[in-house]
Image (cartoon, grey):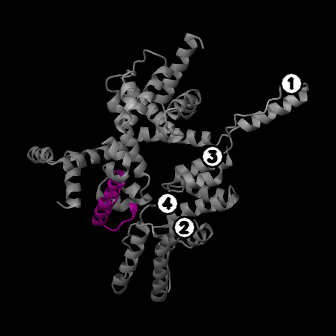
């Protein structure tokens, strides 16, 4: 691919990712997932591991784009692959894989990248656990975290008192926190 | 400190509603107490994670791409004769290769597995109950909820039977809630046909919305992309149902790929 064409493609990918355009995300997947998958699977990971890594890499790039802190000095492909590689090596390092310690220094990225990786993995775990709650719990917690008052939540959800909403909110949140804590990935990420 | 009190204290701290003095005291307490510090970090993370709706949306988009791509048949070893003399044969081979690589729409079974979203715990609803029935019902209901929570679904099913029988003999009716309990427990046991019958019985009340969703999903698993499934999904997709987005996706994937 010529340099100009590659630059245009990279710009399209960056803009599309920032706007969360599904067709662009699919194009990025078609273009680059195989490379990431091969990298992960050749190092003992599964396809599911590769999917997690690729997803986290896209989210990391999205976060950096959103905050205006991403200034590409390489192609989008090189950068995305570098992020994915670092995420995988970070995971391996946490699991005590000695080879990862040596390899990880070969990948250089923005200074805040590691912090963003860890937050991305943690928050993905929290959202995944949230989806395991019942519909009513999810709805109630969404209202609560959006700052809707207990009285209003009771009205919207057809509960008879604020006291009940409070009790239910406590149980829902506790359930969520317990689900997160029980996941081995949480202990790895702590 | 009790869990509830601790949680409330953490939430008040995170909401910024503590006075400067209270805030300072809490932070001193955190410095001394590692578990409190860890708990605050977790609560803060959860709140921030759930507020990131844009990232949740992006993750959902990526998840959908994965779902579509996983269904692509990946057969790499396509027989290629060394000498293809006839053009007709070439076309057949090309057609065959194209067929192998064409993405297949997700199967109803896969969609059922992916989107069903069965609750891990059923919580007690504060329905109005007459005082004389309350004590006995509460005990059985608690036994059911506990069995369900512990994933002892056979035991949970027996408890639902007791609940239904007691309610029927005392009031002459069975509330939708018990049919809902029965339906989700049967789904946990993969007894879909019976579960469908339970969900059909939910006519009104707090469990109607959730019951509609599980009814539509169970029907999907049993019948595939049928007209009744389409009608059930459309009912959800065109309402304010919390699962409307999933229903819209389902309609798109099954009936308008």
Q: Are marks 3 and 1 in contact (CB under 8 Å)?
A: no
- Which image quadrant is residue B23 in? top left
> Alpha-carbon neighbours of circle 4 within 10 Å: few (<14), some, or many (≥20)?
some
Magenta part of the protein: which range? A157-180
- Asked if one can make out residue B204 in the rendered structure from this viewpoint, the answer is no
Name the residue that disc number 2 marks: B189
Q: Position of residue B1 (x, y in %)?
A: 16, 60
Q: For this view, does B198 lie left or right of residue A65? A: right
Judged by depth in the image, the label closer to the viewer, 2 or 3, is 2
Judged by depth in the image, the label closer to the viewer, 1 or 4, is 1
As drawn, the label of residue B83 is: 1
User: Do dots 1 and 4 share one subunit?
Assistant: yes
Q: Are marks 3 and 4 in contact (CB under 8 Å)?
A: no
Name the residue that disc number 3 marks: B252
Q: Chain of mark 4?
A: B
As drawn, the label of residue B118 is: 4
Q: Secondary structure at mark 3?
A: helix
In this view, B91 is above or below A178? above
Q: Chain of mark 3?
A: B
> Alpha-carbon neighbours of circle 3 within 10 Å: few (<14), some, or many (≥20)?
few
Q: For this view, does B139 lie left or right of residue B252? A: left
Q: Position of residue A9 (x, y in %)?
A: 55, 19
Is A160 a magenta residue? yes
Task: Please tell me which residue is depicted at 36% across the width and 41% down the height of the picture.
Answer: A122
Counting residues from the start of the chain, the first of labels 2 and 1 encountered is 1
Q: Secondary structure at mark 4?
A: loop
Measured in 3D between alpha carbons, the distance from the residue under mark 4 to the one under mark 2, in whole angstroms, is: 12 Å
Measured in 3D between alpha carbons, the distance from the residue under mark 2 to the one under mark 1, in whole angstroms, is: 55 Å
Q: For this view, does B105 lie left or right of residue B89? A: left
């Amino acid at each position: 691919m010529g340099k100009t064409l590659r630059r245009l493609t990279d710009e399209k990918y960056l803009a599309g990712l920032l706007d969360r355009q599904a067709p662009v995300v699919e194009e990025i997947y078609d273009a680059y997932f195989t490379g990431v998958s091969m990298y992960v699977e050749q190092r003992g990971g599964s396809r599911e591991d590769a999917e997690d890594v690729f997803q986290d890499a896209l989210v990391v790039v999205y976060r950096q784009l959103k905050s205006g802190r991403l200034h590409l000095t390489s192609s989008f492909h090189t950068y995305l692959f570098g992020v994915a590689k670092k995420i995988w090596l970070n995971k391996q390092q946490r699991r005590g894989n000695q080879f990862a310690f040596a390899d990880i220094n070969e990948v250089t990225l923005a200074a805040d990248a590691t912090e963003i990786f860890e937050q991305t993995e943690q928050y993905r775990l929290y959202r995944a656990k949230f989806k395991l709650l019942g519909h009513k719990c999810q709805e109630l917690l969404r209202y609560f975290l959006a700052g809707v008052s207990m009285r209003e939540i009771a009205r919207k959800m057809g509960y008879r008192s604020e006291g009940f909403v409070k009790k239910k909110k406590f149980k829902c949140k506790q359930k969520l926190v317990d689900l997160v804590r029980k996941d081995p990935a949480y202990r790895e990420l702590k | 400190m009790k869990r509830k009190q601790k949680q409330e204290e953490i939430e008040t701290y995170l909401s910024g509603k503590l006075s400067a003095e209270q805030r300072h005291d809490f932070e001193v307490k955190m410095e001394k107490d590692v578990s409190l510090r860890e708990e605050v970090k977790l609560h803060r993370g959860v709140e921030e994670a759930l507020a990131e709706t844009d990232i949740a949306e992006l993750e959902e988009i990526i998840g959908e791409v994965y779902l579509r791509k996983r269904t692509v048949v990946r057969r790499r070893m396509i027989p290629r004769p060394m000498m293809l003399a006839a053009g007709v044969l070439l076309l057949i081979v090309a057609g065959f290769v194209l067929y192998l690589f064409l993405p297949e729409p997700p199967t109803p079974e896969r969609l059922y597995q992916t989107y069903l979203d069965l609750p891990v715990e059923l919580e007690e609803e504060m329905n109005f109950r007459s005082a004389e029935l309350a004590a006995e019902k509460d005990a059985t209901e608690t036994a059911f909820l506990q069995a369900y929570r512990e994933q002892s679904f056979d035991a949970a099913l027996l408890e639902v039977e007791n609940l239904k029988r007691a309610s029927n003999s005392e009031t002459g009716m069975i509330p939708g809630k018990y049919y809902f309990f029965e339906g989700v427990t049967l789904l946990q046991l993969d007894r879909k046909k019976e579960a469908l019958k339970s969900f059909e019985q939910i006519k009104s009340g707090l469990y109607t919305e959730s019951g509609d969703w599980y009814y539509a999903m169970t029907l999907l698993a049993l019948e595939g992309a049928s007209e009744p499934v389409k009608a059930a999904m459309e009912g959800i997709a065109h309402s304010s149902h919390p699962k409307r987005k999933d229903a819209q996706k389902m309609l798109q994937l099954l009936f308008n790929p």
